[in-house]
Image (tube, rainbow, N blue to C red):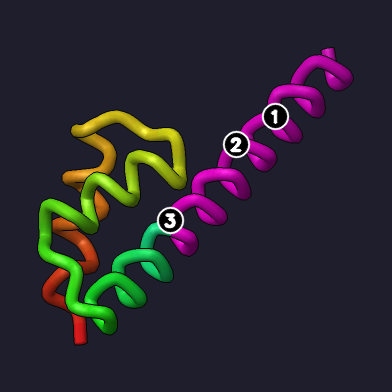
């Protein structure tokens, strides 16, 4: 049973690391897009393209980081 719980723990850690990586990339893309004067919608489209995410995920990242200074 320990082997199974270890496997699930490791899988959860890997998923968490992947989410953290994507979240960091989203922030970088949004900050850069703002620096070069992309609009909100242009930036959101770029996020979807670069991170291969759906519209809802892109919108969530935009809400998190668009107004951040």
Judge the density around disc 2: few (<14), some (14-19), many (≥20) Cα neighbours within 10 Å: few
Residue at x 56%, y 55% (from the top left corner): 21
Q: Which residue is mark 2?
A: 15
x and y, in percent, of residue 62 in the image: 19, 56
Q: Splitting the image into 4 quarters, where does residue 11 fall?
A: top right
Decide if residue 40 is on the left or right side of residue 20.
Answer: left
Name the front one of labels 1 and 3.
3
SS at circle 3:
helix
Marks 2/3: CA distance?
12 Å
| Label at residue 40 | none
Question: Taken as a whole, is the magenta stretch helix, strand or loop?
Answer: helix
Q: Earlier in the sequence, mark 2 or mark 3?
A: 2
Q: Residue at x 45, y 46 (%)?
A: 50
- Image coordinates of residue 14 in percent, x first then y, are 68, 39
Left or right? Give the position of 36 relative to 23.
left
**Residue under numbered circle 3:** 23
- Disc 2 and disc 1 in contact, CB within 8 angstroms: yes
Few, some or many residues within 10 Å of mark 3 (<14, 14–19, 20+): some
Give the labeled residue for mark 1.
11
Instruction: State the separation of the CA atoms marked 2 and 1.
Output: 6 Å
Q: x and y percent of residue 25 in the render?
A: 48, 60
Q: CA distance from mark 1 to mark 3?
A: 18 Å
Residues shaded magenta: 1-25
Q: Are marks 2 and 3 in contact (CB under 8 Å)?
A: no
Locate the C terminus and report the quarter of the image it occupies: bottom left
Q: With respect to residue 28, does 64 lie above or below?
A: above
Determine whether 54 is above or below 43 in the image: above
């Amino acid at each position: 049973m320990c082997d199974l719980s270890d496997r699930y723990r490791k899988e959860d850690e890997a998923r968490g690391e992947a989410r953290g990586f994507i979240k960091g990339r989203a922030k970088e893309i949004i900050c850069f897009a703002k620096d070069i004067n992309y609009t909100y919608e242009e930036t959101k489209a770029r996020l979807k393209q670069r991170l291969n995410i759906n519209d809802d995920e892109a919108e969530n990242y935009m809400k998190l980081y668009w107004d951040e200074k």
